[in-house]
Structures are given as structure tokens and as C-alpha cells.
Amino acid sequence: MSGADKNALIWSRWRGSREGGVWLIASAISLSLVLVLGMILLLAVRGMGYFWPSEIIAFEYREYREDPWMPVQGEVVGREDVIAAQLISAGYELESDQGTVERWLIKVGNRDVGPSDFLWVLRQHTRALKVPEDVAVIERLEWGNFYGTISELHRGDERIGRAQDGSEALMDALRESIERAEALRIQVREIEKHDIGTINAALNALRLEERGLNLRGEWSPEHAARLERARQVQQQAFEQLSGQIAELREQLMRDSISVVDAEGARHEIELEQIVRVLVPNRMGVFSKLAAYLERIWEFLSDEPREANTEGGIFPALFGTVIMVLLMTIFVTPGGVIAAIYLREYAHQGMLTRIVRIAINNLAGVPSIVYGIFGLGFFVYFVGGEIDEVFYSENLPAPTFGSPGLVWASLTLALLSLPVVVVATEEGLARVPKSMAEGSYALGATQFEMLRTVLMPIISPAIMTGLILAIARAAGEVAPLMLVGAVKLAPSLPVDFTFPFVHLDRQFMHLGFHIYDVGFQSPNVEAAQPLVYATAFLLVLIIIVLNLLAIQIRNNLREQYRSLES
């Protein structure tokens, strides 16, 4: 027998055995795991590396020989090799025999004084490259980072620090002033959100009460006098708080720093606009690690700014988690009850089979179709009826008749309902009929048998359905764009204003945030690292929710294993 015949015989035997199928399945699973881990690693490196304080470089650059040399300083955020022929065709002066040319993407910042805060430069068109020790990265609430050398620190007309006195002394005084400014900003934010927010809610309640009295025909001079007195009380409180905010802002505006940019121009930056100041070229590993952790915490706990390309993502993180929890609360009883009815109560005929086929087909319907259904049925029909009955005094402004958290959760619950129904039915099918018959023999009713025997046994199957539902619903974006998710929500769905949980409010979502920052941002280079970081966080949330559900399922499976046997 020739070698080719032997190989063909071995291949035919291996292909026909079970071992071949096992190896193919194991290979496919291993490849899938490698791809998933590679994706997570890519997101982690590209996203989390953004928060590490990078080295600041300074050099002179010109694109063409006749151009003057231009001073540049900033962070190198990207490197790539470009084919020289492409650059020559674009007008760059390069040697024709060059294969590739190294190009740098420099984050130069200073968006308020320059044409762009990012600059592509050819490495071979630079000169006098150095790493200056005193260049600071000034992170601001608006206009992004500012790169320059801090020369003086002012409080009003008084100069309380300057570079000639020593950089360490200047930085210590600056840190104290920034902490003071941050404390003042927090006071202003607390007054605006909590105290003034409470006053606005009270004034809105008085307005709705007046409108309701007019609609019911119960308006009287006594009601008018009482409501006017209540408005005056709220107005006086508002004026007092406005005075406090004005005093705090006046204190904030007194502090400023003088900064010299790469071209030698001097700029004044108010400490009110400064988040933090770093001098990366003088920082050690531990100080950079502290700044790295501080930036990550800001990313997780702060609100977005600068068209969502800077700051944090806490509103989107909070909105994603609370929406998934609400979706789980809505989908669990509906899916379990539907599965129990189809399996235990419904007549197993043609109609039941058609219903099962319809449920299986619903799992393949595009998610945007669910979004359109949710907008038409939940928002316009159900929400509009709720407004007519309970919030008529607020019309024509809608309350529940507009996209909100509750409608988004219900839409995603409907989207993931087939998964829960199918998983629960499969769990019911695995329960031996003898267990139900034994319960009936002991005198239990069908409901008692379901509650005490079947439900504990099928609870792992229910958790499996929830795991799949959470994995799908947490990453959906298309339906949320129609039923509740927005680019920037003015307030969270949960706050300290009665009734504390506002299901009618719109919310931010991590998936929609990724779409908005990645594809709608005018500043692509600034948005790219935040897209990676947000996507990495979304994947982590899905993994954590799934692991939690798997742990609960495994505990339930171990607890009721004796009943199944």
C-alpha cells in the first residue's frame, strides 16, 4: 500500500470516528477563545494605555524646505510607516528611492489657540528633538489639554508663586490652589444639582397643581394666594442660593496661572477650568502610577465633557447597569410564565406548535424592529394613555409619552423574551414525569407541584436563559436609539428628588456612547482611545454579569441535584 493510500485510510477512519468530531469541536472552541481574548487584550491595551502619563517631547518641524521651522511640543500618541511614494504624490519633498517613512501623530493640545490639537509630522522633517523637564500637561474642563511651561501663579492681583522661586515650590502652591478650586467647584455643583434642583422641582409641582385646579374647575382666590405664597418662599430660597453661587464663583475666578507655550507666547488660565496639572518628564514610576489610577477613577466616576471626548462615563455606566437590571426584572416572570403555560397548561396541538415556532422566529428578528415596535406601542400608545389619565395637567409636554428608561427596559425585555422561554421550556422537558405524578399522588395540586417541585429544579435553566438574555441586551444599541438612550442626559434616573426613581427619564448607555463618540465626534483622534476604553468596560460589565449569573446557576444546580436524580 502506497503512502498516499495509507494517509487516505487513516483520514477516513479518523473522520468516521467520534474522536475526529471531538477534535474539530475542541479546535473551534479554542479558536473562539483565542479570538475573544485577543479582542479583550486589544481593547485593554488601546483603551487603558490612554490614561498613563506620556513623555512630552519638543522639536522643530517643517513640511517643505521653503517653510520656516515651527516649534512643536506634545505627546506622541501614534506611530506608523507610510509608503514614500504616496507622500511624494501628495506633494512632500522626499527621496524617490525611500521605501517607507516614519510618521508621528503628536497631541499638541492648546485647542483654543491653534488650528488643531493633533498634528501628523514626518520624523525625518524634524530637528532639535529634546525632552524638556518643565513642560506641564494642564488638563482643563474645556478646550482639552494645554501644553506649556508654568511661569507664575496668581490670586487676584497678588502673585503667590513663580518659576524663579523653584519649580517644586511653585508646583506645591499650585496643587494647593487646585485642591481649593476643586472644593469650590464641588460646592457649586452640589448647590446647583441638589438645592436648586429641589427648588425647581417644587416650583414645577406648584405649576402642575395650578394647572390641575384650572382643568378641574376648582380654581379660587384662596388657592391663588396659597400658591403665590409658596412660590415666593421658593423664589427667596433660590435668590439666596444664587448669591452663594456668585460668591463661590468669584473666589474661583481670582486664581489663575501664567503659561508659556512652545512659541514663547504667554497665556492666562483660570484655575476654575483646570482639572489637574502634571509634569510627566519629572515624574517617577510611582507618581505616574498614582496619576494613572486617578485618571481611571475619573473616567469611571465623572461626567463626560467636550462632546463626550473627555471626562468620565459614569452616567452611561449607571444607565447601562440599571437598564439591564430592570430588563431582567421584566423578562424573568414573563418568560417563565409563558414557558410553564406552553408546557404544562396549554393543549399540545397545532396552535401550541405555531406559537412555539413564532417564539423561535422572534429570536431572529432584527433588533431595530423591536425598537420601532417599542416606540409605537410602549412610548406613543401606552405612555400616551398614561399621560392622559395620570398626567393630564402636564400636557402637551409628555411625561411617559416620550422615550425613557422604562420603555427601553421593556423593549429589551421583549427582545430577549424568546431566549428565556426556550431555555425554561428545555428545563421543563428534562424533568421526569414521575416527579409530577408522585406529587399528584401525594395530593398536591398542579400549582403546588409547579411551585415546590418543578420551579426549584428548573431554576438553573431559567438562569441559563437570563445569562443569554443579559449578554444580548447589554450590548444592544439600535433599539435604544428610539426608546430612551441619548447622547447626554441632564440628570440620572435615580436621584434625591421625590419619587427618587424616575423611570420616565432618558438615560445614557455605554453602547450608544461608543457609537456617538466613535462615529459622531468631530475630533476623531481625541475620541479613539475613549472608544477603546468604553468598549473594554462594556465587555467587562457583560462578563461580570454573566459570571454572577453562572455562579448563581451553579449554586442552584448543586442545591437541587439530589431532586433531579
Image (cartoon, rainbow, N blue to C red):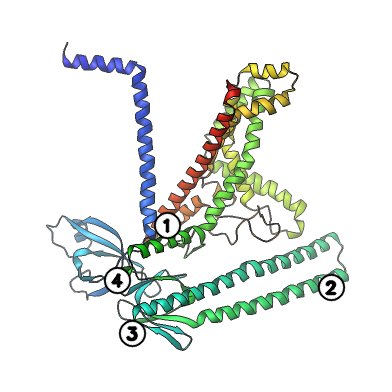
Residue 530: give its label: 1
Q: 10 Å neighbourhood of mark 1: few (<14), some, or many (≥20)?
A: many
Tell me the residue that label 3 is attached to.
Answer: 164
Mark 2 and mark 1 lie on one chain; the one further toward the N terminus is 2
Answer with the quarter of the image where residue 11 lies: top left
**Label 3 vs label 4: CA separation?**
22 Å
Quarter holding the N terminus is top left
Measuring from the top left, give residue 180's x and y in whole percent: 51, 76
Which quadrant would residue 561 be assigned to in this image? top right
Amino acid type shown at disc 2:
Ala
| Residue drawn at point x = 40 percent, y = 61 percent | 292
| 111 shown above or below 159 | above
Circle 4 sits on which residue? Answer: 73
Please, what is the three-letter code of the amino acid marked with disc 4? Gln
Dot 2, crowdedness within 10 Å: few (<14), some or many (≥20)? Answer: few
Q: Which mark is first along the chain, 2 or 3?
A: 3
**Residue kind at label 1, given as amino acid type:** Leu
Q: CA distance from mark 2 to mark 1?
A: 54 Å
